[in-house]
Image (cartoon, rainbow, N blue to C red):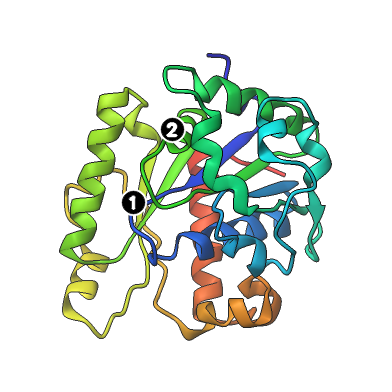
Amino acid sequence: MERVSRLMDIIALHNLKGGVGKTATAVNLADQAARAGVPTLLWDLDAQAAATWCVGAAPGLARPPAKLFRRKSPIGRETVRTRQTYLDLLPADGSLRQLDDLIDKGKDGARLLDRLLQPFSENYGLVVLDCPPSFSRLADAVVRVATRVLCPLIPAPLSLNAWRQMVARFDRGRYGRDTLRPFLSMVDRRRGLHRRWSEAPPTSLRHCLRTGIPYSTDIEQMSVHRQPLAAFAPRATATEAYRRLWLELAGDIEIRP
């Protein structure tokens, strides 16, 4: 498949579990990329619309996703500007819960998604996808078109179990395990296990990014301010952590403005 990622980079945030900092990372990485001068599109694929909320936008699409995914209506018309220069949003919609039905069983969902994304390469250098926490046809399509799939993991044994399931899924689907990048999220250094994993992540976390994201009340305040961290807490420890994570990721895949 001729991937759109040859024209622009696509970063997907994905995990089987919810509540691990996936959406906060998607929003803040997109914001940091935009602040670095990279024209960025944040696509909220989760029907719960948390990423849409956290950038101050309203959920809902003007046209049904069925028309967009079947290319009966231009998806580019659905993008909205955010308060951050270089950052646009493709908002979530409640009907996204039916997306798996639009990707017919046995059909190539990745090719469909790739065709939808291709026009965006004219205006954006980076697309960040906030995915719902599940295995699905949509998730399978996303991981096949993504340049990198970032998986936030809370330092705990259950996280390793979820990680092993993701790796097994990638191996069965032959998606290319090298695109997977785990990183530690919601790290509380007052806890012994969190400190130990921060200093030496388990060996099973192949290609683990060095930068971890701390547990922080500032991150929780994103839903109150409806802005990325850098907009209302530029000097916070968590803001700096997201900046470092962006720089590490940008170096990994050589993203430049």
Q: From the viewer's perspective, is 137 left or right of 77? A: left
Which SS class for mark 2? helix
The residue to which callout 1 is attached is: 16
Viewer-proximal residue, 208 or 155? 155
The residue to which callout 2 is attached is: 137
The disc, 1 or 2, on the residue closer to the chain's N-terminal end is: 1
Is residue 117 in sight in this rendering?
A: no
Structural crowding at the residue carrying mark 1, measured as other residues with C-alpha within 10 Å and reported as few (<14), some (14–19) or many (≥20) = some
Which SS class for mark 1? loop
Q: Amino acid at mark 2?
A: Arg
Residue in the image at 60% along x and 77% along y:
223
**Quadrant of the image for the C terminus?**
top right
- Vertical order, 33 against 119 (above or below): below
- Vertical order, 135 against 106 (above or below): below
Viewer-proximal residue, 110 or 29? 110
Q: Amino acid at mark 1?
A: Leu
Outermost residue to the top: 1
